[in-house]
Image: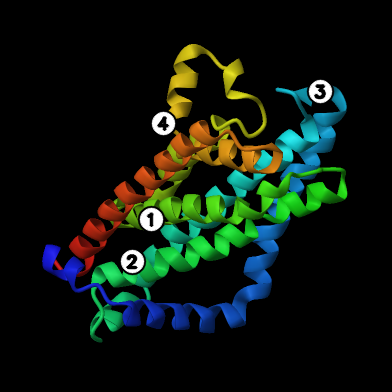
């Protein structure tokens, strides 16, 4: 495996991207609709629903608090789901990766191509709630321009998590365990709709190990003002998460496709 990693080449990754672009040119309306509308509905429902009752949370207008938190939630769902379902279907039913590996392409290059494509697409889509919140009075600072960087970094970790999960489930129906047992708790304990500081002590500790929490904090700080040392820690946590998921995803895909 080490020899293969030393032989990493970008040409196969570009080939994976060209294939993804060809597919995306056919299906972008439906995939874009779901990716953009769902977080917008969350924002409008919670922002205006609870916002009318709550007013301010943790020093922010509730609409601003949710508008920045939903960005991370959108990142989770638009990266983990394609990582799980697309990878499983292409490997198990369509045998797309078998065809790719017949060319001079290695497993880690396929994983890099798939994960980076999902990360870029998810990172861009995830910024939609901020655009909606702008229309309802959000006044971001100049740091808002780097939000896509944080969402792409987070999306790369969750895309790789999805790819890894697709290699350990026995059937596509088993993703229900992943969604209900892993993704939903991450989604709820991330500071998206309410501050993590209001949770019990044990739940706050769990939240610090939640990659989505670090994304929420980074996005919120980018919009309202950076906290350099704290944000460096959040960024480091996301880099560590992506690195761990990369190792697991490559190992899992290699086991399923070659070993």
CB atoms of marks 3 and 4 within 8 Å? no
SS at mark 3 in the image? helix
Specify the quadrant of the image occupied by residue 224. Answer: top right
- At a point 79% along the width and 36% down the height, the residue shown is 63
Look at the picture and state if 34 lies above or below 64: below
For the residues marked 3 and 2, what is the alpha-carbon distance in whole angstroms? 44 Å
- At a point 26% along the width and 60% down the height, the residue shown is 250
Does residue 234 appear in this view? yes
Horizontal side of residue 65 vs 102, given as left or right: right
SS at mark 1 in the image? helix
Label annotation for residue 98 = none
Residue linked to disc 4: 209
Residue linked to disc 1: 160
Name the spot of residue 115 as percent of width and height, x first.
41, 63
Name the spot of residue 188 as percent of width and height, x first.
57, 32
The quadrant in which the C terminus is found is: bottom left
SS at mark 4 in the image? loop
């Amino acid at each position: 495996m080490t020899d293969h990693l030393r032989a990493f080449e970008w040409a196969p990754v570009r080939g994976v991207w060209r294939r993804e672009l060809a597919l995306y040119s056919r299906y972008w309306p439906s995939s874009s609709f779901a990716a953009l509308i769902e977080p917008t509905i969350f924002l409008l429902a919670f922002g205006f629903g609870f916002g009318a009752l709550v007013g301010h949370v943790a020093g922010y207008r509730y609409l601003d608090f949710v508008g920045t938190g939903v960005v991370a939630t959108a990142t989770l769902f638009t990266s983990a789901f394609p990582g799980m379902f697309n990878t499983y279907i292409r490997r198990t039913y369509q045998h797309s990766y078998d065809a790719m590996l017949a060319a001079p392409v290695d497993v880690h290059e396929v994983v890099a191509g798939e994960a980076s494509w999902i990360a870029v697409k998810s990172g861009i889509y995830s910024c939609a709630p901020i655009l909606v919140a702008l229309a309802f009075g959000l006044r971001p600072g100049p740091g808002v321009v780097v939000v896509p960087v944080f969402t792409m970094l987070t999306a790369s970790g969750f895309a790789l998590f999805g790819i890894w999960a697709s290699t350990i489930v026995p059937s596509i129906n088993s993703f229900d365990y992943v969604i209900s047992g892993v993704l939903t708790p991450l989604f709820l304990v991330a500071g998206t709709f309410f501050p993590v500081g209001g949770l019990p002590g044990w739940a706050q500790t769990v939240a610090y190990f939640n990659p989505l929490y670090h994304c929420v904090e980074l996005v919120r700080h980018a919009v309202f003002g950076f906290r350099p040392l704290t944000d460096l820690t959040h960024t480091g946590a996301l880099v560590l998460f992506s690195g761990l998921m990369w190792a697991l995803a490559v190992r899992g895909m290699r086991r399923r496709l070659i070993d």
